[in-house]
Amino acid sequence: MGKFYLFLFFLFFLIFHSYAQDLQKLKVDKLHITSFDKVLDDISETFKLKFAYDRETLSAFRVDERPIKKPLKMLLDQKCGEYKLKWYITPDSVIHIDSKYERLTSKPIETKEQRTYTGDPSKFNFDLTGLVSVL
């Protein structure tokens, strides 16, 4: 039973490893005079790849280029560098394109409400050093 799981692990490793290498083998050879999001849609349809990106952000970037048998990895590196974006592949074989400065965890920053204390002091005779601020 353990050999079977080891075989499955090895098989999945080969599939994911070969997928990352395939981006170098995929050659883009089509004239694109449109927005970057439509270029990615065209590449997705042509090569049956999955992309995840913010369509509104990428639609602002204009692409006027005809790559002549340029590897997809090189095209993504060039365009993402030009537009200050980053791209990466997740284990589920999806190519994500995000802003270079976007945080990986998009949690909103929580702010504390400022509290005011109106009662009498409850502790006496202690030293306090440093910056004191009441939030």
Image: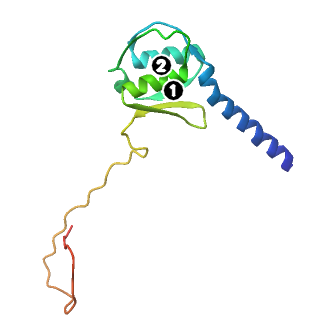
Residue extending farthest bottom: 125
| Residue at image mark 2 | 40
Q: In which quarter of the image is residue 36?
A: top left
The residue tagged with tag 2: helix, strand or loop? Answer: helix
Picture coordinates of residue 40, whole percent (x, y): 47, 19
Q: Which residue lies furthest to the top in this view?
A: 31
> x, y (%) of residue 127?
21, 87
Cβ–Cβ below 8 Å for labels 1 and 2?
A: yes
Q: Which of 116 and 85 is in front in this view?
A: 85
- Mark 2 surroundings: few (<14), some (14-19) or many (≥20) residues within 10 A: some
Is 121 situated left or right of 22 in this image? left
Q: What residue type is labelled 2?
A: Leu
Q: Answer with left or right where residue 24 lies relative to residue 116.
A: right
Q: How crowded is mark 1: few (under 14 residues within 10 Å), some or many (20 or more)?
A: some
Position of residue 2 relative to residue 80, above or below, is below
Judge left or right: residue 4 versus residue 24: right
- Rendered residue at 60%/31% (across/down): 93
Dot 1: element: strand
**Disc 1: which residue:** 51
Indicate the amino acid at tag 1.
Phe
**Percent from the top left, x then y, of residue 104?**
43, 44
* Residue shown at the point (73%, 34%) measured from the top left: 14
Q: In this view, does 117 lie above or below 44?
A: below
User: Which residue is located at x 36 percent, y 39 percent?
Assistant: 101
Q: If you read the primary sequence from the N terminus, does the residue marked by circle 1 or circle 2 appear first?
A: 2
Nearer to the camera, 12 or 123 = 12
Residue shown at 31% from the left, 52% from the top: 109
Q: Which mark is residue 27?
A: none
* Residues at marks 1 and 2, CA–CA distance in whole angstroms: 7 Å
Quarter of the image where one finds residue 72: top right
Above-or-below relation of 81 to 104: above
Where in the figure is residue 135, as x and y percent of width and height? 21, 67
